[in-house]
Image (cartoon, helix red, strand yellow):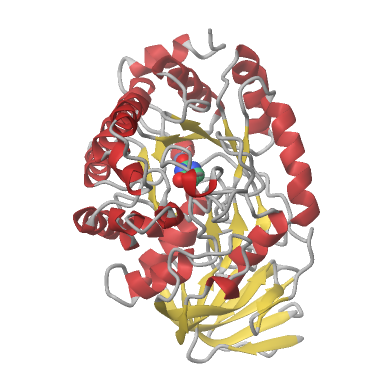
Amino acid sequence: MKKLDLTIHGGRVVTDSSDCRADIGIAAGKIAAIEDKLERGDRAIDAHGKLVLPGGIDSHCHVEQLSGMGILCADDWYSATVSAAHGGTTTIIPFAAQHRGQSVAEVAHAYAELAKAKSILDYSYHLIISDPTPRALNEELPELIRSGITSFKVYMTYEKLKLDDAQLLDVFAVAAREGALPMVHAENNDVITWITRHLLAAGHTAPKYHAVCHDPAAENEATNRAISLAGLLDTPVLIVHVSTKGAAQAIHAARTLGAPVFGETCPHYVLLTADNLDLPGVEGAKYCCSPPPRDPESQQAIWEALSIQSLSVVSSDHAPYRYDESGKLPYGDKTSFKQIANGLPGLELRMPLLFSEGVLKGKISLEQFVALTSTNHARLYGLHPRKGTLAVGADADIAIWDPDRKLTVRAAELHDKVGYSPYEGMQLTGWPVTVISRGEVIVEDGETRAKAGRGQFIARGVPEPLRNARPIRAGAGFLRKLFASSVSN
Ligand code: DUC
Ligand code: ZN
Ligand code: ZN
């Protein structure tokens, strides 16, 4: 046995498919041994009474990014990765966003520089495609996919980001041809715009109307449409931040028929409701995100979808905007629901919330927790088996959890720069007390022990749904061949 740099003793070691007591040995940043009993390494951590889990992967968060409304996130790559690490996450995949008129390649390269300088965690990023020009589709995207950026997000809403159906098909065709996973923000823009017009005409401007204009019907229709369009080319697709029963059912139905359709949700869709937006003045802005939190029946449907695995990943959708004029409220207390920056903070609490409210309350098992917060992200986004699991040869990205640690959420104690938490005052049980990235202890005793820039860019492989050979639906094969050489515009 080679010399071990770090050993972890006596913990309950849990992956997405196993749960046993074992020691873990780490050498040169990788897991070198998982055995009943190991000799102590250069450094040894006692994990008796603790859970030893794969570090989390957060595959949907916004960091140092300009929104469609032109608002810059409050968190940069340093504060975001420190915050994520304290919550048990060891890899993040935020977005390099192409705004209209921009070159995707230039956007990606500029974003890579920001990450390299400041990230304490290993990372990759997705692209956001808002201007699918022939150059973007035929030259830039294929080149970026080959360099390991094997996923991109497209929007069906937001005036400055949305693609029409033909553009969605163009992007899906590139994804199918080049081996990338498209992620879709599925809300019907016309439905939202139409309701908004009527609300504003009637003088309804308060934050609670954000949830009214983003009606579940908008999400349900767009989810069904995105699934149908991906089905036309028989290409995998992932629907992000699923919040409604109808959208979860559409994904479930497609999966039942064998379609490579995947879904993501976020803690706020199982823990918050539209009532949270109904606060005095503009305070409800703290809970405005798209889609918005729904109602108890939707929460129940999303928990159910998680437990039966029709939704595959839980991400934070961390979109850090301060509750002031730099973020949420560009016009102060005169800001209407339409002008509020969309998004909630969530990098640090994603895993503790799901552990406390999901695992400890019996809604999901511990193995499902690992799958939903880590392993499935690695599989879907081309990081597995290097990340997302505890296995010999994998990166030693590990979070040691004290399952009994109790705490009350206080924004002032979190590490992001948002300044408020939608969960302020909530009591949680379970917290990651030691966090290890590539064999280095980066969080311990509540302290950050990592320097800006230590994180590495991880070139991602082909996402698993595109790797698994499967029969292509008749007709889709013809269409895919038609698009095989290039995409017309
Ligand atoms: N909705 C998004 O689509 N992105 C960022 C945050 C949000 O609320
Ligand atoms: Zn979105
Ligand atoms: Zn988002």
Residue 17 visible from this viewpoint: no
Whether residue 47 sits left or right of residue 155 in the image: it is right
x, y percentage for residue 201?
Answer: 31, 29
Residue 477, quarter of the rendered image: top left
Above-or-below relation of 386 to 413 = above
Q: Nearer the viewer, residue 138 or 117?
A: 117
Quarter of the picture containing the N terminus is: bottom right
Residue lying at 52% horizontally and 92% vertically, measured from the top left:
48
Residue lying at 70% horizontally and 76% vertically, measured from the top left:
441
x, y percentage for residue 122?
Answer: 68, 57
Above-or-below relation of 367 to 178 = below
x, y percentage for residue 22?
Answer: 52, 83
Q: Nearer the viewer, residue 392 or 226?
A: 226
Q: Nearer the viewer, residue 320 or 301?
A: 320
Whether residue 56 sits left or right of residue 299 in the image: it is right
Q: Nearer the viewer, residue 51 or 315?
A: 315
